[in-house]
Amino acid sequence: MKKLFTLVITITLVIGSYTFFPTTQINAESEDSIQTSDTLKLLCKKYGIDKNEAELIDLRFFNEEEKANSPMTLIEKKDNSLTISNEEKNLLARLVHAEAKGEPYVGKVAVATVVLNRVEHKQFPDTIEEVIYEKNAFEPVLNGSINEPADKEAMKAVQDALTDQGNDDELLYFYNPETATSDWILTREVIKTVGNHAFAI
């Protein structure tokens, strides 16, 4: 606890120095040293504080204005991660189950990731339901297999895709090269192939 308190005081003093001593040509060199060397990670290492203890800081000691104006990022968080309802998770899991039945588990995660990426992409609708039910987007919607219950593996694949947001965030399409009938989809750049599916941008 003493080490954690020391770290808090150190960070407070570092941020305070930016507040009361703005950048000038004279102190520019020392400021650059602070930005590149005295990160939270290095401070934690210096004071022997592990990651879990550091997370307790969580910027609670600084108000929102101070955080917005601070020249340093003390703790990076995925604040912009997509969160979805249980109903949306279930719908996405049903799609994964229908699209990737018999495919490797990593391929099921990739299918879920494609849908999540579309929700975040400006060229696609803004919700899970709208993306899945977009006209001619997914075969299971056309043939009705989207209505089949999802198995546990499909549900887990959706959860892993949500947890790993940021990985494969460029993937927007997937298809089976052996059965694809669209000439357009074959023009997309394939990033990886998992099982029978090619994943593309």
Image (spheres, helix red, strand yellow):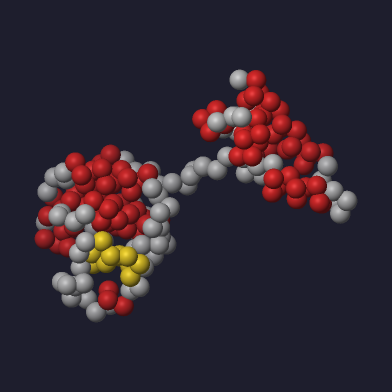
Evaluate whether residue 81 shows in this view: yes
Q: Residue at x 75, y 33 (%)?
A: 13
Residue 128, x across and y down, in percent:
30, 51
Q: Quadrant of the N terminus?
A: top right
Q: Residue at x 69, y 34 (%)?
A: 11
Q: Quadrant of residue 113?
A: bottom left
Residue 123, x across and y down, in percent:
39, 65
Compared to residue 1, the image places residue 137 above or below, namely below
Residue 43, x across and y down, in percent:
65, 36
Left or right of 52? Residue 126 is left
Compared to residue 174, the image places residue 2 above or below, namely above
Left or right of 59? Residue 37 is right
Q: How many dots with numbers? A: 0
Residue 69, x across and y down, in percent:
69, 43
Q: Quadrant of the C terminus?
A: bottom left
Q: Quadrant of residue 20?
A: top right
Q: Residue at x 32, y 58 (%)?
A: 114
Evaluate whether residue 137 shows in this view: no
Left or right of 45? Residue 139 is left
Compared to residue 68, the image places residue 142 above or below, namely below
Q: Residue at x 51, y 42 (%)?
A: 77
Q: Residue furthest right?
A: 26
